[in-house]
Structures are given as C-alpha cells and as structure tokens.
Amino acid sequence: MKKKEIWSWVIYDWANSAFATTVMAGFFPLFFEKYWSNPDDVIQSTYQLGVANSLSSIIIAAISPFIGAIADQGSVKKKFLIGFCYLGIVMTGGLFLVKQGNWQLAIVLYIFATIGFRGSNTFYDSLLPIVSKRQRVDFVSSLGFSMGYIGGGLLFLVNVMMYLSPEKFGFIDKDFSSLYVQIKNNSISFNDLEIAVTGLSDRYSELKTVFNSGEHSESDLIKKVSNTYVSAQSLAIKTSFLMVAIWWAIFSLPLIIFVKEPSSGNSLYFKDSLLMGYRELKSTFLQIRQVREVYLFLFAYWLYIDGVDTIISMAVKVGSSLGFAAGDLITALLMVQFIAFPASLLYHRFANKIGTKNAVFVGIAGYSLITLLGYFMSEKIHFFILAGMIGLFQGGIQALSRSLFSRLVPSGKEAEFFGFYNMVGKFAAVIGPFLLGWITVLTGNVRFGILSILILFVLGAYFLSKVDFEKGEKIAMKLSKN
C-alpha cells in the first residue's frame, strides 16, 4: 500500500479532531450556556445541549448501517465521507454568524455539524481496511488517533490562547486589556478609570461617549467596560469555530485527492443502490447475529467504550461539581490531548509485544484504575494525575478497538460492518452517563456515581475475553465478496 494513501487517510484524523476538541469538548458547551442560551438558567441550557447531543447520536446511529450498505454497493464510501465532512464544515463555520441569544439557530447548526462529524467518521473508519494491510492495521489506526490528538490539541491550544489573551490576537487593545485586569482585581479607582477610558483609541469611541454623557452610574460604567472585554473574548471563541471549519476543510483534501476506493463491480443507479443496500443491510445483520465473534465483540465494545466515553464526556462536569476551576479543567483537557499523541503510538508498540487483544485488556484495566482513583479525588493535583492517565490509555483503547474490529470485517462489506460498529459506538454513551447521574442522585454523592462506571469495564472485559479473533478472521475471509 502506498505511503501517500496511508498518510492521506491519517491526516483526516488531524483534520476533524479539531471539531471534537475545540467545538464539542471545549468551547461550545460553555459558550452556548453563557452567550447563546440564558446564562441564568443553567438547567435549561444543559437540557438543550443534552437533547442536541442525543439527537445527533441517535440520527447517526440509526442511519449508519443503512448508508454503509448503500456505500458498499456503489463503492461510494468516499462520496458519503465527503458529503458528511462538508456538511460538518459548513455548519461549524456557520456558528461564527450566530448572534447572541439565538440559541435555536446555534443548536440546529451544532446538531448538523455533529451529524457531519460523526457521519464522516463512519466512512473514514470503513476505509481503514482498504488503505492498510491487515498486518499493519494496528499501526495505521493508532497513527490516525495520535495525529488526531496532536492536530486537535494544537488548534485547541491556539484557540484557548485567543480566549485567555484576546489582546495578543487583535481582538482588543493591550491598554484595554490592562484596564480590565485592574477592574477585575479592584486595583483602580473610578476616577482613574475615567481618565484611562478617555485615553483609549478611537476603536472605543462609543464607550468613551457613554462615559462622557454622565447618564450612567459608576457600577453601570464599570460593567460596560467589563462587557466590552467579554465581547472580545466572545469574538475570539466565534473565530475559533470558523478556524475549525477552515482547518477541517484544508486537511481533508489529502484524503479526498489521494485515497482510492476500489470498485465493487456494481454500476447501479441511486434507486437500485437503495434497494440493494436495504437487502445487504438485512444480510449483514443476519451475518452479525450468526457470527458469534462479531456480536460478542460488539457487545463487549459497547460496554467498555461506554465507560470510556462517559469518563471523557463527564470529566469536566464532574470536576466542576467537585469545585475545580474552569482554567484547571481546560488545562487538564489540553493535557489529555498532548499526552495521548505519543501514548497512542507507544501503545501500538506495546500491542506488538503482548498482542492487540491483551493491550485492550490493559487499557480497560487502566480505565478501571482511573475510575477507582476518581472516587478518592479531592485535590487539584489528583485531577491532573487522572487527566494524564486518561491520556495514556484513551488513544490506545480507541485505536486498537477499531483495528481489532477491522479483522472481523469481510472484504467488500467495510462500510456496512463499520456502520454497525459506529452505531454501537453512538449508543454507547447511553448507560454510563445515566448510571453516573442516577447513582449520584440516589446516594447524594458524585463519588459513588464515578465508582459505578467500574461495572461497565468489568463486564466489557469479561465478554471481550470470550472473543476468538483467529476464528473470526477465518469467518471474515469466507464471507468476503469475490
């Protein structure tokens, strides 16, 4: 297999991981609450965001196997990938234009952007067995995840710097930033503030006019200065969304140009592809039910990846509930990204020595330990240690799970089988968050909620131990399309 095709495939992970970090995990949840929704009604904004995430997951989970079957019939995996990819890009870029308070439009754009992101991943994963030989699939899958972590992490780092220091990126003047810091620290009198505002550049002529009018109280004027700085930070975040769209679009080009998809030999009209896709979907579902190794692996994966996804999605919320500052949470998120980059590649070497399946068991054990330690977490340093541990295991367990499943996939049925794989992945984030929330409410202690996730790793490891991958590979060869 040509290195150019492998690297072109890998770079797509670099491209779309920017959406996962900056938009999904980083800025959108906080910005939605503070800027687009009602900042005084946290419960309502949390509900709206939860519905948006659930809706996009359900839609992709429902359609992934079907569109995967269609894609295999007409050899159009790349076309579907491109379609979902640019749906996500356009919707993400659209967030830049959404005005304050328009939560409805923000949610709609976010839902479709997330559908684009998750839908493109279905077909991206299905190209893995095509671009990589079976004996190299662990390495290529791990390389993809590691590049995703470093790519998404680098852009997120720049975006965080834009938010924390908007004056360094031209969103606000340095003099104004210094003024805001003095207000925040209560180290400037109102008289000195008036003098300082008068000396600002014409960029702040409207604010200067308000100060000179004498129609506002001191507290209102101080608030207006603070709001001007917050507006600059808001513009920095909205610009970050636009940067994600541009980043995603540019770094998708190598895959679009250089990765070649082999022809299925079928030359079908779209209507015929739909009918054939539906028939193939039924056939694939029956095959999965009949092949013990496939459905056992999918069930095991559903359990342990639910635990992984719950820790990823709930860590910031749990950290906030335990009283950790927002700055510390963002720092921990960046730690995960930059530790996961080398860890994913090293984990591949580790898998070569002990076997891929055993390496996944180690990852499950690592997450079990993280869950146990999370129960005792009380200091900021504990949160950072756990973030580092998550970085060590996260990329490895995700990459090796993908490559393990690819060994069970018959040639010519990549999109169909990975459609089911991604459907399981999307439905995975169902039990864990509910279990964590339910146990937290039941006991009145979030620590017991964290501990409850352990059962998912224990059960996942048990069912994974029952999967015979050598037998599964032989069956996949027999089921491969000629």
Image (spheres, rainbow, N blue to C red):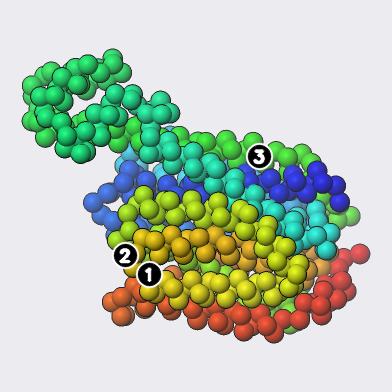
- Say above or below: 205 vs 458: above
Q: Please tell me which residue is depicted at 19% across the width and 34% down the height of the picture.
A: 183
Quadrant location, the C terminus: bottom right
Q: CA distance from mark 1 to mark 2?
A: 9 Å
Q: CA distance from mark 3 to mark 2?
A: 38 Å
Q: Please tell me which residue is depicted at 82% across the width and 63% down the height of the picture.
A: 134
| Badge 1 or badge 3: first in the primary sequence | 3
Q: Quadrant of residue 317?
A: bottom left
Q: Residues within 10 Å of mark 3 (few under 14, many from 20)?
A: some
Mark 1 in CB contact with mark 2 (< 8 angstroms): yes
| Badge 1 or badge 2: first in the primary sequence | 2
Q: Which residue is mark 2?
A: 322
- For the question of whether residue 7 can be seen, the reply is yes
- For the question of whether residue 115 can be seen, the reply is no
> Which amino acid type corresponds to the residue marked 1 in the rendered image?
Met
Helix, strand or loop for disc 1? loop
Q: Quadrant of residue 239?
A: top left
Left-right relation of 361 to 405: left
Relative depth, front residue between 272 and 111: 111
Q: Residues within 10 Å of mark 2 (few under 14, many from 20)?
A: some
Q: Which residue is mark 3?
A: 251
> Which amino acid type corresponds to the residue marked 2 in the rendered image?
Leu
Which of labels 1 and 3 is toward the front?
Answer: 1
Q: Which residue is mark 1?
A: 377
Percent position of residue 354, x then y: 73, 73
Q: CA distance from mark 1 to mark 3?
A: 39 Å
